[in-house]
Amino acid sequence: MLEEHGDNASILAGGQSLMATLNMRLASPDLLIDINGIDYLKGISVDGDRLRIGALARHQEVEQSSDVAEKAPLIAAAMPYVAHPAVRNRGTFGGSIALADPAAELPACITALGGDIEIASGSGTRKVPAEKFYRGLYDTDLDDNELVTAVEIPVIQTGYRSAFDELARRHGDYAMAGVAAHAQINGARISNVRLVFFAVGGTPVIAESAGHMLEGLDINDATIEAAQDVLDQDIEPFADNNCSAKTKLYYAKILAGRVLRKIAG
C-alpha cells in the first residue's frame, strides 16, 4: 500500500502523535494503514551481541523488559521519561524513532549507543546507522514507501557505562534539554565518550568536541568542567516555547556534568 499511495498514506501504530495531528487538522491522509497485526514488528529479542526491539514494541514493554535493562541500560534509564504512563501504554518504540521529534529521548539514546534502524519496503530491507538516519527537523532517511521495522542496538560491553538525564517543566512533558551518554571507563580514565543531546537542535546532537576533549583523561571535576566549557562548540540551540537558546545551552552544560559524574561512579 505504501508503494501505491506514498506520502498520501499514514501509518497507524500506537497513534499517539498521529491522532493528535489528525484531530488538529494538521494532516489529512487519503489512507490510514494499521500495522498492529504484523507479528514481525513486535517483540524484543537478543541475538548474540545485538538487542533487537521491534517497531511495534510498546514503550511500557520496553520499560519493563529485563533484556533491555541488562543489555541496553541506557534505554531502560530513558524510558520513564518518555511522556506519561498512558502514552507509554500505547505508544511504540518504532513510532518514536520514525517521528524524529527533536525533543524525544529515544533517538538520542540509539544514536549514543551506535544503533541501527531497520527499514523495509517492497524492494527489500536495509539498515541505517542512527546518526545518519536523522537529517533535520522531523526529517529522516525514510522514503515515502518505507517503514521502520526494528531497531538493533549493540549490547553493552564490559567496562562501558551509560547515563541519562533531562530537564522538563514537569516530568513527562517535552524536555527543555536532555542528554544520553555512553562511555568506557577503566579505573578513573574515560574513553570512547558519546554525549548526545536532544531538544537543543533539529536532530540528536553529538557533542564531538567534548568527547574528543575527554578521550583518555581521568574523569574528575576539572575534566568535567572543561568538557562543559567546550559544549559551546558542539551545540547551537534554538529557542522554543519552553525556554531561550541561551537557557538551553546552560541546561545542556548542567546535564553533561550530571551524566559524566554518574558514569564516573
Image (tube, grey):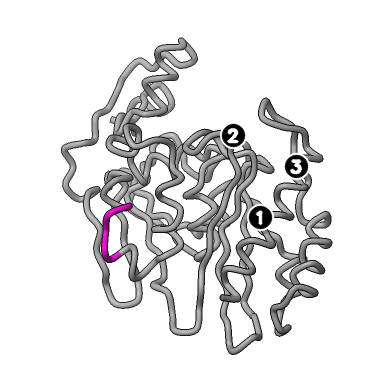
Magenta region, residue range: 63-67
Is the C terminus in the top left, top right, bottom left or bottom right quadrant? bottom right
Residue tagged by mark 1? 255
Q: Is residue 59 magenta?
A: no
Whole-number angstrom distance, CA of label 2 to CA of label 1:
15 Å
Secondary element at tag 3: loop
| Picture disc at residue 237 | 3
Disc 1 and disc 3 in contact, CB within 8 angstroms? no
- Nearest to the observer: residue 196 or residue 6: 196
On screen, residue 18 above or below 116: above
Q: Quadrant of the N terminus?
A: top left
Q: How far apart are labels 2 and 3 at the CA level?
A: 18 Å
Q: Is residue 232 depicted above or below 34 in this figure?
A: below
Distance, label 1 to label 3, CA atoms, is: 14 Å
User: Image check: 78 left or right of 180?
Assistant: left
Q: Circle 2 is placed at which residue position? A: 169
For residue 112, the mark is: none
Amino acid beneath label 2: Arg
Tell us which disc is closer to us: 2 or 3: 2
Crowding around mark 1 (Cα neighbors within 10 Å: few <14, some 14 to 19, many 20+) is: many
- Residue 33 image point, x, y percent: 27, 27
